[in-house]
Image: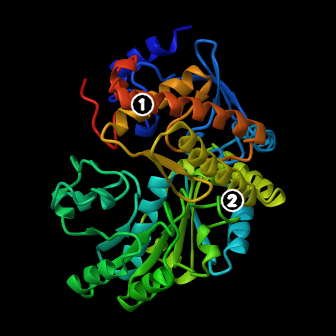
Amino acid sequence: MHSGSELYARARQRMPGGTQLLSKRPEMFLPGGWPSYYSWAKGVVVADLDGRTYIDMSICGIGACLLGFADADVNQAVHAAVDKASLCTLNCPEEVELADLLCELHPWAAMVRYARCGGEALAVAVRIARAYTGRDVVAFCGYHGWQDWYLAANLAEDDALTGHLLPGLAPNGVPRGLTGTAFPFRYNRVDELEAIVAAHPGKLAAVVMEPLREREPEDGFLERVLETAHRAGAVLVFDEVTSGWRLAIGGAHLNYGVAPDMAVFAKAISNGHPMAAIVGTEPVMQAAQTSFISSTYWTDRVGPAAALATIRKLRQHRVPAYLAEIGNRVKDGWAEAARRAGLDIAVSGIAPLPRFAIQHPQAQAARTLFTQLMLENGYLATNAFYATFAHQPGHIDGYLSACEEAFRTVAQALAEGTVEAQLHGPVAHTGFARLTS
């Protein structure tokens, strides 16, 4: 068995960038120190290839494992699906059962299509919206993946997506012919959406947005987005890939009483098993029949079986309420620990997805030092926390105690100008900076 560092060195030779998901690259956390691979994971405990175990207080499977890793109930459903054949010549009945459940949870919706990850599901939604309207232009707010329709926004100017959650999204390989088909607007700025509509009369196919991410919508914002989209003859698509299931059983938009034309789910819908769903109104969804949208592995049995088991457990245990409780404890705990340690931080984000930012010119180096210190103390930790049902009060207590100790060390290092000297490797990479070395 290779060590994690040895295996990652091999991976860099075999796979461009070393990992399939940018958010899992060790350089994003602690270059040279973050464990690259896991041997097993259960609940919130992760074991690396070198025999060490950690409590995951970071991004917890990039937000996919809402119930915790290897949840027993979901695993049981998946094992049963595999035993009965995960794929065959016919269709699995679970996909119809899941469609019924998704429409029950979203009474405004009547039809469902499936995919197996968020990025491709959003591409499906945009394709359907363009087919329905016969138009090309998309206005969007938030981060929506790697597909051409989205990155086309960066063809006209290199920084069109800067400040849109994740800057530096390179459009290399995106056809230049897509220039002028995607335009961003900022959250709570409906005036920017209205300006896009005015600049492209009769051309807007869809408005794609996360109903919330870092903060709550201002009064009337989502309603005005819906009104603006429909007045322009466009389809409103809510991207619930990240927000879905954390704040409500279903989409977070259910809490605001604003019904889109389509909503897209992935990540937490199936607790770590590949699954995505596009739910929508019948007139809009039927437009899928006028385009070619089809893929073999969209018909596998594991995804729907995992989603059904996950949703049932989320409902049974009222998981969103628990996530809010855990997340708020972490937010309040960060603020108090930083105050006692003398470290200036700003805490933000919705309860299940909080984050903090160190307020200092050397913030990125300081955040890297925090991760290093927490790792040495047995925690996978960065400046963001994805709450799960597997996080227990004892996990939070131990973590916050370790945070205060790490905050104190970071504050002292900043005061003495020794942050980078205390790092065992380089400062962590940021955003979508490309790895060229």
Q: Residue at x 64, y 38 (%)?
A: 400
Image quadrant in which the N terminus is located:
top right
- Residue 281, placed above or below residue 407: below
Distance of label 1 from label 2 (alpha carbons)? 43 Å
Q: Which numbered circle lies on residue 397? A: none
User: Can you see residue 218?
Assistant: yes
Nearer the observer, disc 1 or disc 2?
Answer: 1
**Residue linked to disc 2:** 95
Residue 265 position within the rendered picture, expressed as x and y whole percent measured from the top left: 57, 60
The image quadrant of residue 28 is: top left
| Amino acid type indicated by mark 2 | Glu
Front residue (pair 3, 321): 321
Front residue (pair 261, 358): 358
Residue 183 position within the rendered picture, expressed as x and y whole percent measured from the top left: 27, 69
| Amino acid type indicated by mark 1 | Thr
> Is 164 on the left or on the right of 101, as rendered?
left
Answer few, some or many: residues within 10 Å of disc 1's Cα (few below 14, many 20 plus, some between 14 and 19): many
Q: Which numbered circle lies on residue 368? A: 1
Residue 310 position within the rendered picture, expressed as x and y whole percent measured from the top left: 74, 52
> Is 266 on the left or on the right of 84, as rendered?
left
- Residue 196, placed above or below residue 346: below
